[in-house]
Image (cartoon, helix red, strand yellow):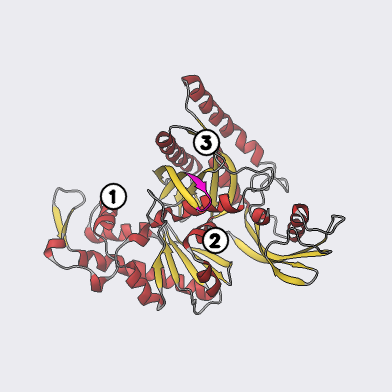
Amino acid sequence: MLVTQSTYVTLDIGSSSVRVMVGEVRRDSVNMIGVGEAKSRGIKKGAIVDIDETVNSIKEAVEKAERMINASINHVVVGITGNHIQMQRCHGVVAVSSEDREIGDEDVNRVMDTAQVVSIPPDREIIGLVPKQFILDSRDEIKDPRGMIGVRLEMEGTLITGSKSTILNMLRCVERAGLEIADILLQPLAAGDVALSEDEKALGVALVDLGGGSTTVTVFDQGDLVGTRQIPVGGDHITNDISVGFKTSKEEADLVKLNNGHAYVPTASDEEDDSFEVSKIGSREQQLFTQWQLANIIEPRLAETFELVDKEIKRMGYDELPGGFVLIGGSAKIPGIMELAEEIFDQNVRIAIPDYIGVREPYFTNGIGLMLFAHKHMRIQGKDLSAKLSQPGHQEQQGSKQVKREQVKKETPARNQSGGKGSVKDKVSNMFKSFFE
């Protein structure tokens, strides 16, 4: 297999599943060549609660992807989200260093580094920086100052920080799975790049990611990400409600949700032709239900989720978003969900589906977003985020890879216990600095 510089591997660690996606990116087009998915174990409500179980889930997803592409995966781009993410305004200013006063890469790097010299609590770490605008000798609203002539360069942006312990635990899981982290990206920001239009971001829009264990709501306004929050309610709660209501196993309840689910009672079918059988837990008895009966279980939980989303958006200071709401995630594919969301939000709603062969489902949006974001923004000088894939060889090579994974597992605690100021930054390498490089 010919591996080019445009091949990326993304790792999406969710509460219900761990997904590894391998794709070749050329300009804005993605050729998906492999997907590996495993049931998420050790993750509850978006947080790691069992490292060993999480590591096993990552390994399983990676191995499935490796079998599909017939190559070994060593480097991944990891998405991160959660309520531990915080944002604050920042400002940097430097004097242009070159003799001819032309703005270069070094000047952009220095002004962004200066903007990160802020006081933060010891339990938090700077993940990255989102530039809002550059100001050159009082000329503002500059998106890319390189090549321009000036004396004083300023930058206004948003600084993103995260919980140091949360980041370290995630890094430890990925490394114990035998992988090297190419970079860590803010997942809602990356998903917004592929799910939202520039007009929606400019007007003000909410991106709602309906995951398994949690729902993430992210608001963009005037073209910028202004806030993201995670709500501990998701598709797994719907599955549990069906399990209790129909007195069946969670496994069968999940299948019923996927195959027969409907989110809006007024449009659900009550016809006998649309009925389905569900086995009663602990017996061989089969029960007959209609889509309308199932909708009466699904709708209240989704309505509660959307009401919580609406409250979070209002806490961010937005009573109305002209750009409306965009839904992604596994639960977004349930029929009738748009009608219910429109009724709750009283605004326009649409479902974002990636338009790429093999991944035309709303739950692939995060992985595609991470891939395109990495390709578009993250390839800076001396930094390559593309995948390091290798052909599987003889047993010795496979065995050496396993030895390497065991070595990583043993070495990781020692590295992560250093507690130094730059210990996390060694892994989390200024993910947004590359916007203008």
Which quarter of the figure has residue 189?
Answer: bottom right
The residue type indicated by label 1 comes to: Glu
Q: Is residue 1 above or below residue 300?
A: above
Q: Which badge, 2 or 1, is on the more N-terminal residue? A: 2
The residue type indicated by label 2 comes to: Asn
Please say if the residues under marks 3 and 2 sit with CB atoms less than 8 Å apart: no
Residue bearing mark 3: 3
Give the x, y percent position of residue 48. 50, 49
Q: Is residue 25 magenta?
A: yes
Checking the image for residue 251, the label placed there is: 1
Q: Nearer the viewer, residue 6 or 281?
A: 6
SS assignment at label 1: helix
Left/right placement of residue 249 relative to residue 51 reads: left
Q: Is residue 210 above or below residue 359?
A: below
Q: Nearer the viewer, residue 390 or 185?
A: 390
What is the CA distance from the residue labelled 2 to the residue labelled 1?
29 Å
Q: Nearer the viewer, mark 3 or mark 2?
A: 3
Residue bearing mark 2: 83
The secondary structure that dominates the magenta segment is strand
| Region of the chain picked out in magenta, as a range | 23-28
